[in-house]
Amino acid sequence: MANSAQVPANRCRGFNDQKAEIHKTLIFIIISCGIHIAFNRGISVLKEINMPETSITLGGPSYEEYQSALDLFEANLLLDADDKCADLLSKYPHNSKLHLLRGAANMGNGHFEQAVTHYQCAIKADPDDKRAYKDLGLSLTELGRLEEAATAYRGFLNLDPKDLS
């Protein structure tokens, strides 16, 4: 597959240079990162956010608390997962993994504005969490906020330019 980041600007008719660059970036992301997930309402099992069984984060939930929310999500009980995350976030408001999981539950329910809020909180809590940038981009794409989505995707790629998952 050709690298679509090299799409010539003249293929982006009707766009100024800035919009052409955003368009090219989105084409690259869509092809390289499999953004089609967004069109299936973003439901994916987020294995990257599993905490090891021995992990109890300082200022965060126990493994059992987190796992109970993740189990609800993986069982596609998204409203229950969202409620469990909300409860845990009332105790641990700055936990990036809980915000990431709640964002995924919101995205799966089609609540993209709420998902954006939680992905932004996840990024604020852990600026090195590339999954939060990617899922923020997915939610923003669903909302038609393409310039903001391109910025989120760039954040994802800046963290690991070789990861095109």
Image (cartoon, helix red, strand yellow):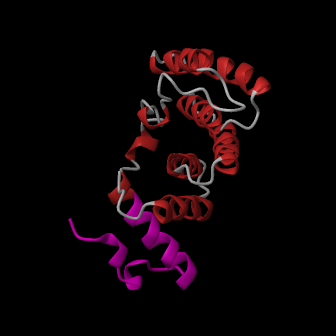
Residue 133 horizontal side relative to residue 3, left or right? right
Instruction: Measuring from the top left, give residue 89's x and y in whole percent.
Output: 73, 27
Residue 68 horizontal side relative to residue 31, left or right? right
Residue 16 visible (yes or no): no
Residue 4 magenta-highlighted: yes
Residue at horizontal 68%, vertical 41%? 113
* Quadrant into which the N terminus falls: bottom left
Residue at horizontal 60%, vertical 48%? 143
Instruction: Measuring from the top left, give residue 158's x and y in whole percent.
Output: 49, 65
Instruction: Measuring from the top left, give residue 40's x and y in whole percent.
Output: 42, 36
Q: Main secondary structure of the magenta part?
A: helix
Taking 131 as reference, is 105 above or below it? above
Taking 158 as reference, is 87 above or below it? above
Instruction: Measuring from the top left, give residue 5's x and y in whole percent.
Output: 36, 73
Along the line of sight, the residue nearer the viewer: 75 or 140: 75
Which span is picked out in magenta? 1-29
Residue 91 visible (yes or no): yes
Residue at horizontal 62%, vertical 20%? 62
Q: Residue furthest left?
A: 1
Residue 38 magenta-highlighted: no
